[in-house]
């Protein structure tokens, strides 16, 4: 994997933190039925204590399109495909954001993302 992005490539995310990675603007003019494809290596505490999410902004504010609802512990890269909402269709400037919200107890490695 090349050009990997992560919360902390050398350890775990910080306690009590909100961190995110936002893409550059993506031109989705003439696009319908948009999908997001990427590889992830995600580890996050469950039980609603820490939350990983993916949001999109088609130019009118952030919309959540995916949220962790349980503990996720991955030990390898996994290919992910996610349908994006119709609100991104035919928009000239769309951003995608990968977010972690953590509590102050146990921390994990969080998002590791490649090949968006």
Image (cartoon, rainbow, N blue to C red):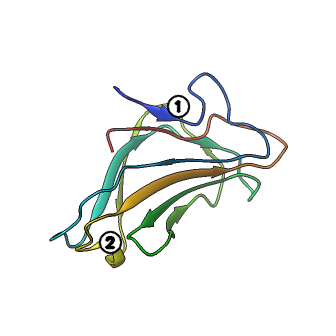
- Label 2, label 1: how many angstroms apart (C-alpha)? 32 Å
Checking the image for residue 88, the label placed there is 2
Residue at the right extreme of this rendering: 105
Decide if residue 94 is on the left or right side of residue 22. left
Q: Residue 14's quadrant in the figure?
A: top right
Checking the image for residue 75, the label placed there is 1
Q: Which element type, helix, strand or loop, lies under badge 2?
A: helix
Give the answer, above or below, for where 42 lies relative to 82: above
Q: Are marks 2 and 1 in contact (CB under 8 Å)?
A: no
Residue under the point 37% across and 74% down: 85
In the rendered structure, which disc, 2 or 1, sits on the residue that comes first in sequence? 1
Between residues 82 and 87, which one lies in front from this camera angle? 87
Checking the image for residue 3, the label placed there is none
Residue at the left extreme of this rendering: 30
Residue under the point 35% across and 46% down: 38
Please state which of the two labelled residues, at mark 2 or mark 1, is closer to the viewer. 2
The spot of residue 9 in percent (x, y) is 56, 26
Image quadrant where one finds the C terminus: top left
Q: Which element type, helix, strand or loop, lies under badge 1?
A: loop
Residue under the point 53% across and 31% down: 75
The spot of residue 40 in percent (x, y) is 44, 41
């Amino acid at each position: 994997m090349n050009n990997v992005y992560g919360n902390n490539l050398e350890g775990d995310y910080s306690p009590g933190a909100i961190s995110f990675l936002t893409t550059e603007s993506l031109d989705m003019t003439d696009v319908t039925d948009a999908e997001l494809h990427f590889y992830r290596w995600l580890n996050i505490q469950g039980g609603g204590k820490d939350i990983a999410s993916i949001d999109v902004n088609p130019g009118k504010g952030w919309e959540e399109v995916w949220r962790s609802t349980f503990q996720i512990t991955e030990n390898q890269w996994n290919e992910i495909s996610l349908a994006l909402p119709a609100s991104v269709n035919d928009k000239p400037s769309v951003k995608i954001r990968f977010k972690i919200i953590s509590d102050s107890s146990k921390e994990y490695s969080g998002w590791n993302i490649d090949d968006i």
